[in-house]
Amino acid sequence: MNTADRSIALIDTALRRRFEFEEMVPEPELLKVVDGIDLPAVLRTINERLEYLSDRDHLIGHAWLMSAGTKAEVDRIMQRKIIPLIAEYFYDDWHKVRAVLGDTNHFVDRDLLRPLPGLDEADTDKRYRWTVREKFADDAYARLVSGLSSTPAADADG
């Protein structure tokens, strides 16, 4: 049960009165290194950042990555499951999504949008189009774990 979803709060309360629940926390140590990607470290790092920015109810479970046997499979899980879930957690605040992913451009691209005609650039905040990359660099996961962000030139658009 996800108690963060208030639309089911009454059902959640009713179930908790009638049943016993055991918390299942993420267990990164159950994961392995896949094609040089230290999955336990990746999951631990993502979850530490999620807990810092949100709370412990919004952690990523180890089961998401248990079936990954190649870098391509890890990438697909990140692209189609984990990154969209993190975006949902932060209501599409992609600055926070990017922070969870190590504040690099290795997972998520951002393109500066031009202001609409008639709007003065000085009067509007910078706005971006965010997209999940089709391909992740070979060192993307190592950078996520290390916290080494991209070079300034890679993020020149703001």
Image (cartoon, grey):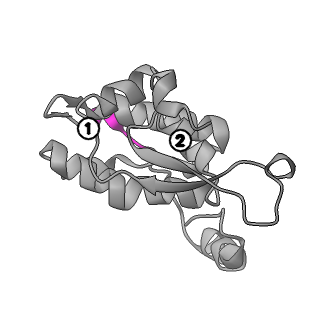
Q: Residue at x 34, y 61 (%)?
A: 80
> Which residue is identified by label 1?
30
- 114 shown above or below 126: below
Q: Please, what is the dominant secondary structure of the magenta stretch?
A: helix
- The part of the image, by quadrant, that contains residue 119 is bottom right
Q: Which residue does the numbered mark 2 point to in the structure image? A: 98
Mark 1 neighbour density, 10 Å: few (under 14) some (14–19) many (20 or more): few
Task: Report the side of 55 relative to 33 (left or right).
Answer: right
* Residue 154 image point, x, y percent: 46, 30
Q: Amino acid at mark 1?
A: Leu
Position of residue 110 measured from the top left corner of the image (x, y, whole percent)? 51, 48
Q: Residue furthest right?
A: 123
Q: Residue at x 65, y 39 (%)?
A: 53
Q: Residue at the spot x=29%, y=42% of the render?
A: 136
Secondary-structure class at tag 2:
helix
- Crowding at dot 2, Cα within 10 Å, few <14 / some 14-19 / many 20+, comes out as many
Quarter of the figure that contains the N terminus: bottom right
